[in-house]
Image (cartoon, rainbow, N blue to C red):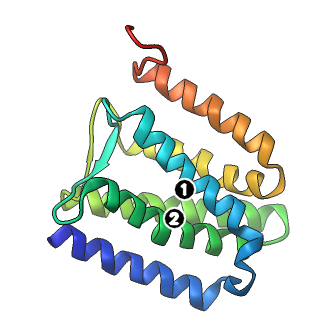
Amino acid sequence: MRFTLIRFVMAAIWIICAYKWSDYKNWKKYYPTMMFFGFGDLIYTTVFKDKKLWAFECDFLVCSINELFVIFTIFFSTTLLFLSRFPKGIWKQIKYIVFWIALYLTIEIFTTSIGMQKNSHGWNLWWSLFHNSVQFPLLILHHKNPVLAWIIAFIFLGLIMKNFGVPAILGR
C-alpha cells in the first residue's frame, strides 16, 4: 500500500503542476503526443512482458491498472507540461531538455532507492539516462512530425530488444 500511496502523491503533484504551469486549456493540441508517450509505455510492457528491464512494484493496484494509472496521470501530465512550455532558441531548448532528463533520472533514483522500481536484466541508471535522452527529444519530434517519430521509436525499440536479448520471433 505504501508504493501506491507514493504513486498517488506523485500523480497528484504532476497533475497540479500541469494545471498550474501547462497550456492545459489547449490539451487537444498535445493529445496525439500524450498518446504517443502512453502507447510507448504500453508497447514496452507488451514486448518486454517476459523480460522486464524495469518494473514498478505493485502493492495494492493490479500491475496493469497501476501502469494505466501512471500513463494517464504522470505521463500525460509530463507531456502536457513538457511540450506546452518548450522554449524558443536552441540553447534554451537544450537546457530545457537536459532539465527534464535530469528530473526523470532523479525520480528514478528515488523510486529505485525505496524499492518502488526494480531494474533487472542489465538495465541500470545509465540505460535510463540514455532512454530519457532519446525520449524527450522524441516527444518534440512527435509533436512536429509523428510519422518520423514513430519510425525512430521502433528503431530504438529494435535496438533495445537486440541489446537485451528479447526475441522478435517466437521460438528464438
Amino acid type, residue under disc 1 in the picture: Gly
Residue 87: quadrant of the picture: bottom right
Quick one: which residue is furthest to the bottom in this view?
Answer: 20
Q: Position of residue 45 (x, y in %)?
A: 41, 42
Q: Is residue 14 above or below residue 90?
A: below
Name the mark on residue 122.
none
Q: Pointer 1: what residue? A: 38
Q: Pointer 2: what residue? A: 75
Q: Quadrant of the N terminus?
A: bottom left
Q: Is residue 49 left or right of residue 148?
A: left
Q: Nearer the viewer, residue 3 or 112?
A: 3
Cβ atoms at labels 1 and 2 below 8 Å apart: yes
Q: Secondary structure at mark 1?
A: helix
Q: Quadrant of the C terminus?
A: top left
Residue 67: quadrant of the picture: bottom left
| Residue at the spot 52% in from the left edge and 44% down from the top edge | 131
Q: Earlier in the sequence, mark 1 or mark 2?
A: 1
Residue 113: quadrant of the picture: bottom left
Q: Is residue 109 above or below residue 14?
A: above
